[in-house]
Image (tube, grey):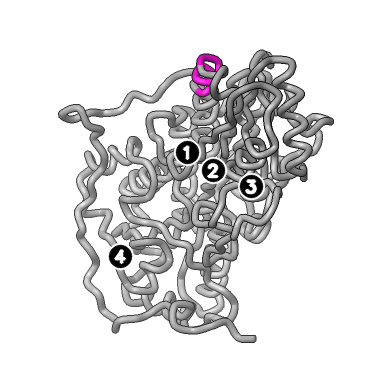
Amino acid sequence: MGRPINMVVAQSGGPSCVINSTLRGIVEAARESSEVRTIYGGHHGIEGVLKEELIDLSAQSPEEIALLRFTPAAGSIGTCRYKLKSWQNEDFDRVMDVFKAHDIGYFLYIGGNDSMDTANKVAKLGQERGLDLIGVGVPKTIDNDVGDSEFKLIDHTPGYGSCAKYWMHMVQNCNEENAGSSPADPVLVMQAMGRKIGFIPAAARLADPDREMPLQIYLAERKVTLEQVADNVNDQLKRDGRVMLVVSEGLDVGDLGEVKDSFGHTSFGASQLTVAQLIVNYLNSKGLATKGAARCNVSGTDQRNSIGYASVVDLDEAYEVGVKALQLAAAGESGFMSTILRKPSSTYGVTYDKVPLPDVANSERTFPDKWISADGLDVSDEFVAYCKPLVGDSMVSLPMEHGRQRLARLKPIFAEQKLGKYVPQADRSKAPV
């Protein structure tokens, strides 16, 4: 580009344990780059760009930036669920105006499927309008559903390994509880995130790779009736006297009074009823093959923000994929997403590369059918071999201060606003019929 110019990095969609590790990688690499002048963070994603709320990340202390590794979720610069759709011409115009006003030449967007679509649209629009703009996507999603089912575009997404590790430990601990309290509470139903895809509930198998626990795993990919669930539960109760179920939040077992978010996805945490509670209610009303009752654990956003369960492997890879994204931007490689590819070796290792944004924008990986058992209640050893390296072999060591976690605390230093106030178009307009 000929001279150092400014950069905006923003986050979108649900957060994760490691999203800030990616942010850290981008910021620290940008500080070392001669191509980048000032680094801004879009406050609450693309909404912050539209509102011209740009956090000055260059003005933050290196110590606070380093602490982003140990700071979960997206509280540092914020995230959003705002998608730029084709009819929102005013929003696209506003993004370009903000970028021009602040001499923005690099736009890096951290997120999942929908975020890659936004990064792709912004990059293309900048080029069409003669703006010297480089747009790069940076992968993030605990669902592991970005990319292709052949794992050629991306092997796994940052955030998934930590969520998988959370469920590995969750099931281990719940098994101790269930084994001890089974005379009164023989059935425990645990609900995992995963609207359509089973990577998160499947990770429960990591807790018991030798299949010694009375564990049943229900993925959203395998439709099942409540009657079938009850039969499966009672069969296991007759054999083992207790049973644990890990169920996908998107398992279709009846009406939940679903609530949709602005992306059009079901927000199960905001819906009227959970899958786990519906199953527990049915089991208790129909009766169990042993004495006692069924109960449920419904994990919420803790499965994506419990930094104590974060995978060290995931934290490291999230950082490096952020560094790779900055390197792509600095090299002028617009229209790509940085990616993680597994090396073809018996020893786990990865490389960091790039894939075209159009190939991953709005992509939706499916859980391989071959990884699901014939009875639909388990996953294969091949899946365990795929997933196990992602959780690592150690626990993260967190910095502490007076007995509490020491989290990054960025100062609220914002770029001076140069344009008039703006209300995002979708917040004041309805989509055309």
Disc 4 crowd rating (10 Å Cα; few below 14, some 14-19, many 20+) is many
The residue indicated by pointer 2 is: 142
1 or 2: tag closer to the N-terminus: 2
Q: Earlier in the sequence, mark 4 or mark 1?
A: 4
Q: Nearer the viewer, residue 289 or 202?
A: 289
Amino acid type, callout 1: Gln
Q: Are marks 3 and 4 in contact (CB under 8 Å)?
A: no
Q: Secondary structure at mark 4?
A: strand
Camera-side mark, 4 or 2: 2
Q: Quadrant of the C terminus?
A: bottom right
User: What residue type is disc 4 on?
Assistant: Leu
Q: Amino acid at mark 2?
A: Ile
The residues tagged by marks 3 and 1 sit, at their Cα atoms, a distance apart of 17 Å
- Tag nearer the camera, 3 or 1: 1
Is residue 295 within the magenta segment?
A: no
Nearer the camera: disc 1 or disc 2: 1
In the rendered structure, which segment of residues is drawn in magenta? Answer: 174-180
| Residue beneath disc 4 | 54
The amino acid pointed to by label 3 is Asp
Examine the rendered structure and indicate whether residue 335 appears above or below residue 388: below
**Distance between the Cα atoms at labels 1 and 2?**
9 Å
Q: Is residue 331 visible?
A: no
Q: CA distance from mark 4 to mark 2?
A: 26 Å
Q: Nearer the viewer, mark 3 or mark 4?
A: 3
**Circle 3 residue:** 145
Residue 364 on image: x %, y %: 68, 53
* Residue beneath disc 1: 303
> Could you classify mark 1 by the number of other residues whose Cα lies within 10 Å: few (under 14), some (14-19), or many (20 or more)?
many
Between residue 155 and residue 145, name the one nearer to us: 145
